[in-house]
Image (tube, coloured by chain):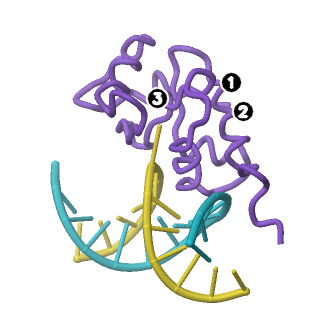
Chain colours: A purple, B yellow, C cyan
Amino acid sequence: MRRSEGVGLFAKKVYAYLKKVPKGKVTTYKELANTIGSKAYRAVGSALSENKDPVKVPCYRVVCSDGTIGRYSAAGGLKKKIELLKKDGIKIKNGKIDLQRFGFRF
DNA sequence: CCGTTGACTCTTT
DNA sequence: AAAAGAGCCAACG
């Protein structure tokens, strides 16, 4: 029963696709999962929480589908995530992101 | 294999 | 607007 593919094949795909997101843009958990070919929105987030390569995998670039920041377990916490996003050139409005402008579509 | 959990999302109160 | 409920899927014990 190959329930788990080593470290989790699913997570691997998440990392791979996330790396494709251009700088200055963000993606949502839903879009990411959909691109991979699954609807495991939650699994995507869980995979990112494991985040083995924070440098290669900018998890801060992943936000909720409604534009909210979501969560950030890495150093600095949610606050740091917002800072990083702003640094990428993403404008945050009242704690929310304009997915119309910054939401990257695969 | 089953039950619980979770960086989610959608619909209904 | 905010909270609660239902649905979704992968990882873990």
The numbered mark 2 sits on a residue in which chain?
A
The image quarter in which residue A71 lies: top left
Q: Which residue is drawn at 39% across and 27% down?
A: A98
- Judging by the rendered image, the residue that carries numbered circle 3 is A60
Q: Residue at x 68, y 31 (%)?
A: A106
Label 1: which secondary element: helix
The span from disc 1 to disc 3 (Cα, nearest Å) is: 14 Å
Vertical placement of residue A49 versus C13, above or below: above
The span from disc 3 to disc 2 (Cα, nearest Å) is: 15 Å
| Disc number placed over residue A28 in the picture, else none | none
Q: Where is residue A69 in the image (x, y as percent from the top left)?
A: 36, 36
| Disc number placed over residue A16 in the picture, else none | 2
Q: State which tag comes first along the sequence, 1 or 3.
A: 1
The numbered mark 3 sits on a residue in which chain?
A
Q: Are marks 1 and 3 in contact (CB under 8 Å)?
A: no
Q: Are marks 1 and 2 in contact (CB under 8 Å)?
A: yes
Q: Position of residue A27 (x, y in %)?
A: 54, 33
Vertical placement of residue A55 versus B10, above or below: above
- Judging by the rendered image, the residue that carries numbered circle 1 is A20
Q: Which residue is drawn at 45% across and 36% down?
A: A63
Label 2: which secondary element: helix
Total numbered labels placed on residues in the image: 3
Label 3: which secondary element: helix
Amino acid type shown at disc 3: Tyr
Vertical placement of residue A33 versus A28, above or below: below
Residue A83 shown left or right of residue B4 in the figure: left
